[in-house]
Amino acid sequence: MSCKSCKPKIFKWKYIKNFIKFIYIGIKSGFKTVSFEEYNNRLNMCMGCMFLSPDGDRCTDCGCWIKNKAKWKVEDCPQGFWRK
């Protein structure tokens, strides 16, 4: 059963802004990734967060796919749960 009101309400401009920022900072830093342990710690923090989308894939605050965002050193949680 699909529910349109259950989907996260994230504006598209926020997606675009965050993606451009990620590309710019990623290129400058060389797209370095965190360790496997730190990646898992970040994901675990996201799984308990109130901003996690109902499907468990996306942050409803920043609009990022958490499994992708958590692996990059230059990224941090918009709520401050984990820092770059």
Image: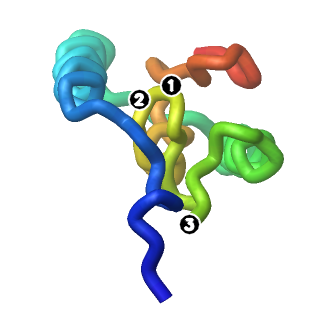
- Tell me the tag on residue 55: 3
Q: Residue at x 46, y 38 (%)?
A: 69
As shown in the figure, which amino acid type bears the numbered disc 2?
Lys
Amino acid type at circle 3 is Asp
Q: Nearer the viewer, mark 1 or mark 3?
A: 3
Tag 1: residue type? Lys
Question: Is label 2 in contact with label 1 (beta carbons under 8 Å)?
Answer: yes
- Relative height, residue 75 to residue 45 (above, below): above
Q: What's the CA distance linking mark 1 and mark 3?
A: 25 Å
Q: Is residue 27 visible?
A: no
Q: Which residue is mark 2?
A: 32
Which is more foreground, mark 2 or mark 3?
A: 3
Q: Which mark is residue 10?
A: none
Of circles 2 and 1, which is in front? 1
Specify the quadrant of the image occupied by residue 17.
top left
Which badge, 2 or 1, is on the more N-terminal residue? 2
Residue 73, which numbered label? 1
Is residue 40 positioned above or below 9 on the image?
Answer: below
Name the foreground residue: 60 vs 38.
Answer: 60
Please tell me whether mark 3 sits on a helix, a strand or a loop.
loop
In the shown orientation, is residue 72 left or right of residue 11? right
- The one nearer the camera, 77 or 27, is 77
Q: Within the image, what quadrant is residue 49 found in? A: top right
Please say if the residues under marks 1 and 3 sit with CB atoms less than 8 Å apart. no
In space, the residues marked 2 and 1 are separated at their CA atoms by: 6 Å
